[in-house]
Amino acid sequence: MKRFLSGKLLIILLLVGLVACGNDEGSGTAGDDTESAAGGEQITLWVPFSGPDGPKMQEIVNAFNESQDEFSVDYQVVPQSEYYTTIDLTLNDNRNVPDLMVMHADQLLTYVENDLLKNLDEITGETVNLEDYNENAVEGAMVDGELYGIPLDIHPLMFYWNKDLFEAAGLDPDVPPTNREEFVEFAQKLTDGNGQYGYVVPTLWPQQFIMPTIVYQNGGKLIDDGQVLYDSEEVVEALEFQRSLITEYGVSPSDVQQDGEVTLFLQGKNAMHMNGPWMLQQWEDAGMNFGVAPVPMLGTEQQAVFGNSHNFVVPEVVGEEKHEAIKQFLSFTAENGMAWAESGQAPVSKAVYESDEFQEMKQQPEVAKQFDYTHFSPRVRNWGQLSDPLMEAVNEVLLGQKEPREALEEATNRAQQRLN
């Protein structure tokens, strides 16, 4: 999710394609459906939804365009791997700037402090009522108490399990573990010594979600008041627990490579798995008999989970003539966002997640159960760069190359230098 382009030529070609508004799939534009609905004031929307979720957001755009003839939205998908590089180039050059963009919560502070996003307190007015959204999601879209995003969803870490393996091990296939003790007990019962593991510990992605989840459940913080806390007792304990699943309890192999835990889960050799709600389609396409639930309390102090969110943001340079169209689209999306839920995501609009239709879905209500205690990344610029030393330490420890405290102390020093 954090890949970057190696050449500027590709970025320029991509921007040319966006401006051209072609109808081919590679351009990422909405195609004939959106263009035929154009009428009145038009705004351009950029999104990073280049996977199966993209067509679901386009359904919402098309429905908005067809619902009235005063405004229209030109829907443009920029591939996730190129998204923020493309945004940076566009905003820095101040050319071909979209009127509305989707941005992750962990990116907001960086763009706000660079004066690139518009304060939405002034333009949302009565059309977009913040009381219609989950409160935690709204707080995640604020910087220093001011609103810079309108939240679309929250996507926290989720817990998945193989129901067939549970039943074969004598466990209730419909009852997942809820705490550390049960989790370890289940994992041991589900490990058979013949290539089947109770829980395969990832050494790379999605540790960006797993490690902070356990830290927050331990009551810890990663960065606070300008101080990097990767070597705090709460963080050390979280990493030691994960390592113990390999070295002490033996419920996981010791040399898992990128996506190895996903492959084993799909093959029926990994009984329990933690990942994001974006994995739903992959499990369903594989025909798995799986369950989904909030993450168990693997920490020691409080219920918590790490997550991110998608937010609608407005570039600072967008003029007032676009504001009404933006407000009308945001209001429409809040009331008519069920298509986004169908993508596997959980919209934070109460009109959607409190509806009977939403509650009848398999995964999405389980995601919503974690809305109120989801923790977002620390409020620092360039969180991705600051978290890299932590993730490198996690990888080294889980591969048996370093001791937890030693690795985390080194990561703290490196990250503190970057933060300073």
Image: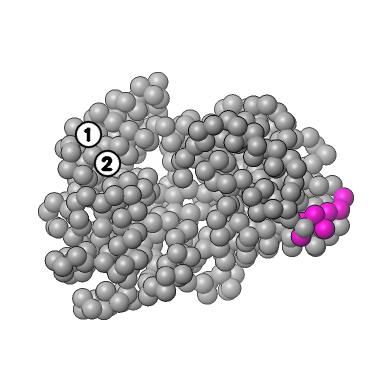
The question of residue 292 being in magenta is answered with no
Contact between labelled residues 1 and 2, with CB atoms less than 8 Å apart: yes
Q: Which quarter of the figure has residue 262?
A: bottom left
Measuring 32% from the left and 71% from the top, which residue is drawn there? 162
Q: Amino acid at mark 2?
A: Val
* Mark number, residue 394: 2
Q: Residues within 10 Å of mark 1 (few under 14, many from 20)?
A: many
353 or 406, nearer to the observer: 406
The answer to which of 166 and 284 lies nearer the viewer is 284
Please report the residue visible at 62 percent of the width from the left and 61 percent of the height from the top. 56
Image quadrant where residue 55 sits = bottom right
The correct choice, above or below, for 12 with respect to 127 in the image is: above
Region of the chain picked out in magenta, as a range: 33-40
Instruction: Provide residue 20's location: percent of width, then percent of height.
Output: 75, 43
Residue that label 1 marks: 407
Hey, what amino acid is under mark 1? Answer: Ala
Identify the residue at horizontal 57%, vertical 52% (top origin): 50
Q: Residue furthest left?
A: 248
Determine the residue positioned at 18% across, 38% down. 401
Q: Is residue 250 visible?
A: yes
Q: Quadrant of the C terminus?
A: top left
x and y percentages locating residue 221 in the rendered image: 34, 39
How packed mark 2 is, by other alpha carbons closer than 10 Å (few <14, some 14-19, many 20 or more), is many
Q: Is residue 129 above or below residue 182?
A: above
Along the polypeptide, which appears first: circle 2 or circle 1?
2
The image shows residue 40 at horizontal and vertical percentages of: 87, 50
